[in-house]
């Protein structure tokens, strides 16, 4: 399957299986996605609000100061020929004609105040920002701290959001160590420790206990049991290893035993061509998903941006994200008829390929911001503007 098609299939699968929305308290909504439009419950602001400290006046001056209006109080209408001291954020009295800023006002003997009001109105009228019932944000917008603040000032205590999908990681491999230096034919597991953090940065929930039991032995019964156990608790299970057709690659057989249906099975992309995405039926509910990642570290992270990111976007109800672009700083070879995902460091829109970027390496990836996308049948030339698939370097989002 072509790389762009595989991404589209993953997104569509997630979108079709997204869960029912829930009402989340504002303090718990950060990083989730609006499941329905956010509307204003009242006019914004709901009443005329002073934007300065000063004096609200009516009629010609000078004016006797007959009172004070502070934020949070409801003033009486202003009488002709009088003034009241007013604070920023306070409700403007009815019949106010001008507000003179405190720095433009002169205090006179006998409690009088004089001054010239600026030409521009010094208060906000009801509905300046939005009228009651107006749509403030559409469904599908990620909830940020600013969105939470907007919801609060527009009168909401909760937000309708799509709950975060839970995700688990299952790593296969008799050759893997989980502590100490590698040696004597065994290597350290470099993916099990990092994948939960990537998943959280993509908006998934990774509850304690779903990070996987440690490397699973290379037998069909053990791998089938491990995937089945993870699927009981997670909507998305990312497996590592076992996607090829070697003597101990059992993932496809395990998925068959679990009734899985392949949505993506091998992608025309390098590295990572043996990646896969399978849908696991759940009686009476939406399906769950298994993303098969190759065991080589860079191939697995290519799978993350190729299949996992769009799948989680769909499950979250987020809009499908078009890839941004970067300008390549130096030539880079393509990979024949396959899309090439080239690890790059991006600064000010310029993408420089990183060194030590072999499929089995993590040294280059640790310095990369994402992958420049070199189309099939092409090479990248210095100055070319290319799409790029960013890594989620910030929790809950993309750079």
Image: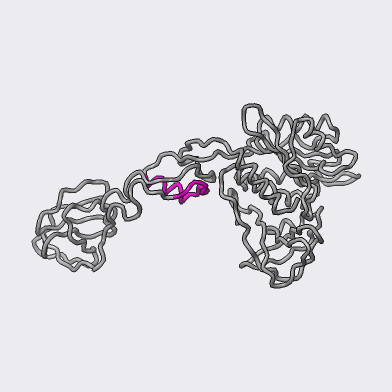
Q: Is residue 43 left or right of residue 327?
A: left
Q: Is residue 277 above or below residue 347?
A: above
Q: Position of residue 269 (x, y in %)?
A: 77, 54
Q: What is the magenta range? A: 137-154
Answer with the quarter of the image where residue 80 lies.
bottom left
> Is residue 39 or residue 330 the one in the foreground?
39
Answer with the quarter of the image where residue 379 lies.
bottom right
> Is residue 184 or residue 223 the one in the foreground?
223
Q: Position of residue 177 (x, y in %)?
A: 82, 41
Q: Name the residue at 69% across, 70% down.
A: 384
Q: Name the residue at 79% across, 57% down.
A: 338
Q: Position of residue 25 (x, y in %)?
A: 46, 38
Q: Position of residue 236 (x, y in %)?
A: 67, 38
Q: Name the residue at 78% across, 53% down.
A: 268
Quadrant in which the C terminus is drawn: bottom right
Can residue 103 be found in the magenta stretch?
no
């Amino acid at each position: 399957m072509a790389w762009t098609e595989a991404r589209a299939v993953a997104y569509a699968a997630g979108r079709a299986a997204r869960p029912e929305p829930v009402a989340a308290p504002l303090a718990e909504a950060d990083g989730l996605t609006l499941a329905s439009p956010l509307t204003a419950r009242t006019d914004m602001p709901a009443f005329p609000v002073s934007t300065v400290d000063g004096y609200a006046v009516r009629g010609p001056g000078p004016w006797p100061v007959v009172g004070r209006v502070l934020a949070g109080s409801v003033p009486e209408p202003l009488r002709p020929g009088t003034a009241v001291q007013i604070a920023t954020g306070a409700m403007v009295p009815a019949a106010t004609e001008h507000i003179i800023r405190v720095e433009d006002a002169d205090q006179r003997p006998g409690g009088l105040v004089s001054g010239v009001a600026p030409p521009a109105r010094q208060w906000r009228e009801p509905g300046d920002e939005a009228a009651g019932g107006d749509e403030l944000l559409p469904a599908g917008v990620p909830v940020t701290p600013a969105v939470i603040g907007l919801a609060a000032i527009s009168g909401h205590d909760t937000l309708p959001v799509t709950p975060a999908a839970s995700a688990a990681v299952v790593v296969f491999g008799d050759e893997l160590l989980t502590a100490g230096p590698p040696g004597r034919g065994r290597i350290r597991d470099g993916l099990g420790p990092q994948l939960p953090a990537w998943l959280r940065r993509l908006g998934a929930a990774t509850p304690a206990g779903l990070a996987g039991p440690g490397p699973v032995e290379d037998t069909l019964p053990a791998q089938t049991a491990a995937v089945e156990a993870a699927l009981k608790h997670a909507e998305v299970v990312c497996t590592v290893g076992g996607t090829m057709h070697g003597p101990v690659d059992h993932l496809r057989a395990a998925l068959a035993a679990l009734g899985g249906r392949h949505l993506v099975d091998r992608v025309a992309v390098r590295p990572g061509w043996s990646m896969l995405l399978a849908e696991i039926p759940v009686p009476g509910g939406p399906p769950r998903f298994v993303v098969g990642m190759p065991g080589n570290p860079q191939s697995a992270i290519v799978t993350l941006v190729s299949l996992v990111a769009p799948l989680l976007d769909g499950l979250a109800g987020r809009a499908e994200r078009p890839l941004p672009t970067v300008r390549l700083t130096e030539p880079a070879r393509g990979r024949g008829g396959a899309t090439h995902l080239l690890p790059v460091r991006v600064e000010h829109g310029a993408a420089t390929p990183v060194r030590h970027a072999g499929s089995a390496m993590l040294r280059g990836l640790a310095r990369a911001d994402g992958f420049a996308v070199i189309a099939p049948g092409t090479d990248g030339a210095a100055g070319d503007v290319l799409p790029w698939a960013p890594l989620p370097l910030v929790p809950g989002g993309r750079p």
